[in-house]
Image: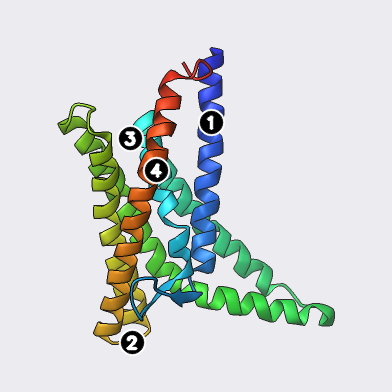
Amino acid sequence: MMRSELNKEKLFLITSALYVVIVILSNMTGGKLVPSPFSDSLVPSSLFLYPFTYFIAGLVAEIWGGKKARFLVFLGFGMAILMHALALFLIALPVHPAGEHFQDSLKTLFSFNGLSLTASLASFIVSQLLDVKIFLSLKKKTMGNKLWLRINGATIASQIIDSFLINFILFWGMMGWSFLEVFEIFISAVLLKTLFSFLLTPIFYVATYYSKRSPLLN
């Protein structure tokens, strides 16, 4: 294998690890609700981290292609399920009296996460695969031009779907919150994710420029 190909595979491995860490951490911390910066409503704290997954998936689709981007999505999906399964296994082990406080903390974290996991993973797999599909479709239609369009077009469209699914499945369907409350959270989430998409666009340009011109990767 040529040195450039080896470096590119190493970069993909690092990128995949970062993606999986963000997916898992977003699932673990989604239960913390924080004030919305746009209204008197609230949003999950994970919204300040989760948009980076769309950035990474788009970057992989741009540099490595759709096959590896979809692999990345399924990898994140599988690792999130594995994390939760392993956590439940560890919680089920007998507890020494000295560790009861920590056991209660784990139960609190993963009992809520068990409720949110179904909603978050359903919205995750649908929206992330849609993101990759729209990104590649826009790339084909624009013949590889207008990078800003496929970045923001794919990210914003897929994250609207993600926000709708996660909020209405979890807060409205599972937790019984009112439609108005959930709709306010949905709007705040979409605005926040859209802002992140625009802010990350220049970084996307720098990353793709470097990947196409670096002697280490070509």
Q: Is residue 50 above or below residue 139?
A: below
Mark 1 burial class by Cα count in 10 Å: few <14, some 14-19, many 20+ = some
Look at 54% across and 12% down and name the residue there: 2
CA distance for labels 1 and 4: 14 Å
Q: Amino acid at mark 3?
A: Gly
Which of the two labelled residues, at mark 1 and mark 4, occupies the earlier sequence position? 1
Look at 47% across and 46% down and name the residue there: 75
Find disc 2 in the rendering and name its residue.
176
Q: Can you see residue 69?
A: no
> In front: mark 2 or mark 1?
1
Helix, strand or loop under label 1: helix
Which of the two labelled residues, at mark 2 and mark 3, occupies the earlier sequence position? 3
Q: Is residue 33 left or right of residue 97?
A: left
Which of the two labelled residues, at mark 4 and mark 2, occupies the earlier sequence position? 4
Q: Amino acid at mark 1?
A: Leu
Helix, strand or loop under label 4: helix
